[in-house]
Image (cartoon, rainbow, N blue to C red):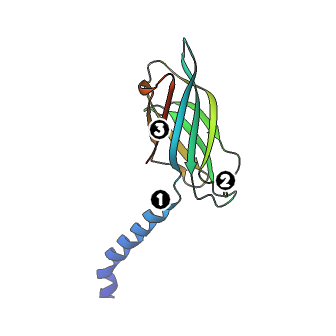
Amino acid sequence: MKILATSSPLILLLLALLGVGSATADDVDILATKFQQQSHGQGGTQWSVSVTLKHNDSGWDHYADEWRVVDADGHVFGNRVLLHPHINEQPFTRSAKGVLVPDNISIVYIEAHDKIDGWMKTRLTVNLDETNNGNIEINRK
């Protein structure tokens, strides 16, 4: 019994490490994004946004099912719901038009979601002040 009591913190640590490893294996990776300015008006700028994701989709019960554009406070400016798994199409890119970002916001984030794990903690930062002729493209290395 003493051996189990002495080794149980080590076992708990190993189990925790294994849990972290398995959670990150199912993360939705945001590989790239492209913002193309559509129009600019009183409320802000409308963008066409393309996002490239990679995820270990395993079927209808577990797949990357949405991405969104948010600000630092979590306000959602646009999103794309993904209606089916992309098991044989990895990575994949999907777009959304009419993403309206207010003029006072220059930094936005791309966040990704899957059906089991919810919203991923890792997100892609986009600085809209760095656009070139109304376009910005970011590729995560």
Q: Position of residue 56 (x, y in %)?
A: 58, 59
Which residue position holds label 2? 86
Q: Residues within 10 Å of mark 1 (few under 14, many from 20)?
A: few
**Residue placed at 61% from the left, 52% from the top?**
115
Q: Amino acid at mark 2?
A: His
- Residue 13 coordinates in the image, percent (x, y): 35, 70
Q: Is residue 51 above or below residue 47?
A: below
Q: Secondary structure at mark 3?
A: strand
Q: Amino acid at mark 1?
A: Thr
Number of the label disc, if any, that sits on residue 138 = 3
**N-terminal-most mark, 1 or 2:** 1
Question: Residue reaching furthest top?
Answer: 42
Q: Position of residue 33 (x, y in %)?
A: 52, 38
Q: Counting other residues with Cα less than 10 Å from the Cα at mark 3, is it few (<14), some (14-19), or many (20 or more)? A: some
Q: CA distance from mark 1 to mark 2?
A: 19 Å
Query: Which mark's residue is nearer the viewer, 3 or 2?
Result: 3
Assess disc 2: are there few (<14), some (14-19) or many (≥20) residues with their C-alpha within 10 Å of its C-alpha.
many
The three-letter code of the residue at mark 3 reads Ile
The label number, if any, that marks residue 24 in the structure image? 1
Asked if labels 2 and 3 touch by Cβ distance under 8 angstroms, the answer is no
Q: CA distance from mark 3 to mark 2?
A: 22 Å
**Residue 15 versus residue 4 in the image, above or below:** above
Does dot 1 land on a helix, a strand or a loop? Answer: helix
Residue placed at 61% from the left, 54% from the top? 90
User: Disc 1 and disc 3: Cα gap in Å?
Assistant: 22 Å
Where residue 49 appears, as percent x and y from the top left, is 58, 32
- 137 displayed left or right of 57: left
Q: Does the residue at mark 1 contact the one at mark 2 (Cβ under 8 Å)? A: no
Give the quadrant of the N terminus. Answer: bottom left
